[in-house]
Image (spheres, coloured by chain):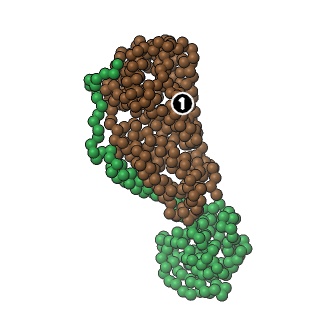
Chain colours: A brown, B green
Amino acid sequence: MTGPLDLAAESLIHGLVTAVTIEVLIRRVPIDAPGDRFPYRVLTLVLPLVLPLVFLWLTPWRASDAFADVALLSIDRWWPIRLGPVPLHVLALSTLGAIGIWLLAHDLWSGARHWWHDRHAARHHRQRTDVPAEVTSAIAQLASHGGIAPPPVVLLDGSAAVLHCRGLRDPRVYMSSLVIDRLPADELAGALAHEVSHVAHHDVARIWGLTVLRVLQWFNPVAQLVARQALQELEWRADADAARATGRPGALARALLSCVRGRDTEFLGLLGKGRVAALERRCRRLLAGIPARARLGRAADLVAVGAAISVLLFFVV
Amino acid sequence: MTTTPTDAHAVLPAPPSEAGSPARLAWVLVVALAVIGLGLRAIDHLPGLLLDQPRGVRLFSSVTDLEREIGTRLLLPAYFPDTLAWPPARVLLASGTAHPTALIIVDRATGRTRLVICQNARGDEPIPDRLLPPGTVLQRVEFDVGGSSAVLSRMAARDGTEWSDLDWVSGSRRVTLRLYGDDTELARLARSMTRVRP
């Protein structure tokens, strides 16, 4: 009989095996472009969630002792091992589950604070209708480069440096007048191109999708870390698109730093060490050069990789 | 607003044809899966090493738990020397449709294994080697166990000790007893194999 604990343990091991395989592919093939990497990160999150249930439904005999003999790894074998009075699997699952919950709670809390900050800025700063012509023309040019209609721009009057993309179905670019005043033309173009890339790829919807996958795998710390990497890939891809569109990755890196410096102390506090480090990595990547896409994230490649990993995971029970 | 590409840090050129190609993706994937598969197989042997239990064998906490799992009662010796400790030190079930089982019984004084009772709960197939302590057959003779023909073997264990091994079919079950002791005691144990607890 396969219970929820068995399914959770199988999902954990499947997640670990998939994450290692995908990481090897990304590093050894290599898959450099963030746009190519992102679908593989999503695959790492989807397979461990779906496969244990599909296998249980289609091949219930996988849970038999006879199959354990041909399996590459049988989790059942670890069940009798104890550390003193505590069964090892109970200790391992509860420890991993606690780490998973902590990672998820930490990121959800951080995301909620950012969301609240942005919502507060949008509500308490007067919306201006006089969006400068250079901004609308830049947005139109960048949107045309990305093959989309120009997204609406919401200009906020305020002292905080606000520049982000919001809206699930109808994404908009929110920016404050301070950003326009503070950034030189080339840096502003880079920053706007970054946001237009988010709009073009429906990244707000993707982020919500990733959040759902994370919440469903609250017990899996590997899934939490992979989801973080996937979010990072979205930012890196937007950076890469912006660098391609403007041809000035250095200007975008300077804009990133200026935007962070321009935000109020409350927001700087929100960034935290991890986010400052992530920002530094983004700048370094921009300055190191933008890798060209090798088109390895096509559906056919993903299906082939997913099928091959599924075959391996069939023998991990 | 949009500028010409005059930055010092430009967009990198496309990667060389081999690096990042679908062919390389397939090659790396096959190698990665093979290495990870071998690694998983190696890890799968760890519980066996930690529990001193061969792969494909499950450990149970009691004979009752094992009987509940396989849905039938085991044959057990009604005669049980005082020198042996009951309950069994280890209760094992190997994978297979015949449900091969083993009860490892230790010496009451020394705590060392003295008797292994193996039986297939269903069928008269040979008992898997992984349930029995390894040894070399020195001598083999025909024997009688309550009217059933049996084979009595003298075995040399790896540590040099000599064991007696009795193998026969009781009803529809294959039974093997391996004892560190004399043949008379082994014969008494075999002839008393019933469903009664010692």
Q: Which residue shows up at 29% across the image and 34% down it?
A: B12
Residue topped by disc 1: A168
Please say if A217 is above or below A247: below
Which residue ends up furthest to the right in the rendered image? B196
Q: Please state the horizontal and vertical placement of residue A233, each as a whole percent of the image.
A: 43, 35
Pinpoint the chain carrying mark 1. A
Please say if B110 is above or below A160: below
Q: Is B156 or A35 nearer to us in this picture?
A: A35
Q: Please state the horizontal and vertical placement of residue B102, each as a whole percent of the image.
A: 60, 69
Q: Image check: A133 left or right of B62?
A: left
The quadrant in which residue B39 appears is bottom left
Q: Is A145 or A60 nearer to us in this picture?
A: A145
Q: Is residue A284 visible?
A: no
Q: Which residue shows up at 61% across the image and 48% down it?
A: A90
Q: Secondary structure beneath disc 1?
A: loop
Q: Is A232 or B113 nearer to us in this picture?
A: A232
